[in-house]
Image (cartoon, grey):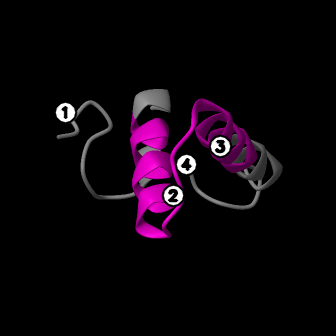
């Protein structure tokens, strides 16, 4: 799951025109994890939602 979040953070940063440095990616992933933890009691787990399995290889 962390590898997937890192891939998404890199893609988002590059899409917005930023250089995906280690520090930027680390901060984006950390904020995403904090947000997930804060809403974990109110939102369903990603494992409960249909979609691509978490073990799918990311290109």
Label drawn at residue 17: none
Whether residue 18 sits left or right of residue 56 in the image: it is right
Which residue position is annotated with label 4?
A: 45
Q: Residue at x 50, y 70 (%)?
A: 16
- Measured in 3D between alpha carbons, the distance from the residue under mark 2 to the one under mark 4, in whole angstroms, is 25 Å
Residue 29 on image: x %, y %:
63, 41
- Measured in 3D between alpha carbons, the distance from the residue under mark 2 to the one under mark 1, in whole angstroms, is 20 Å
- Measured in 3D between alpha carbons, the distance from the residue under mark 3 to the one under mark 2, in whole angstroms, is 8 Å
Q: Residues within 10 Å of mark 3 (few under 14, many from 20)?
A: some
Label drawn at residue 57: 1
Q: Viewer-nearest of labels 2 and 1? A: 2
Of callouts 4 and 3, the N-terminal one: 3
Q: Viewer-nearest of labels 4 and 1? A: 1
Which residue position is annotated with label 2?
A: 13
Q: Secondary structure at mark 2?
A: helix
- CB atoms of marks 4 and 1 within 8 Å: no
The C terminus sits in image quarter: top left
Label drawn at residue 24: 3
Q: Residue furthest bottom?
A: 16
Could you say which is closer to the camera, residue 12 or residue 18? 18
Could you say which is closer to the camera, residue 39 or residue 58? 58
- CB atoms of marks 2 and 1 within 8 Å: no
The N terminus sits in image quarter: top left
Whether residue 9 sits left or right of residue 15 in the image: it is right
Could you say which is closer to the camera, residue 29 or residue 39? 29
Of callouts 4 and 1, the N-terminal one: 4
Q: Which region shows up in magenta?
A: 4-32
- Measured in 3D between alpha carbons, the distance from the residue under mark 4 to the one under mark 3, in whole angstroms, is 26 Å
Of callouts 2 and 1, the N-terminal one: 2
Residue 8 on image: x %, y %:
43, 50
Q: Viewer-nearest of labels 3 and 1? A: 3
């Amino acid at each position: 799951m962390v590898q997937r979040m890192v891939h998404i953070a890199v893609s988002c940063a590059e899409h917005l025109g930023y250089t995906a440095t280690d520090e930027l990616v680390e901060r984006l992933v950390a904020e995403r994890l904090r947000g997930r933890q804060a809403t974990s009691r109110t939102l369903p787990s990603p494992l409960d939602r249909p979609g691509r399995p978490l073990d799918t290889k990311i290109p």
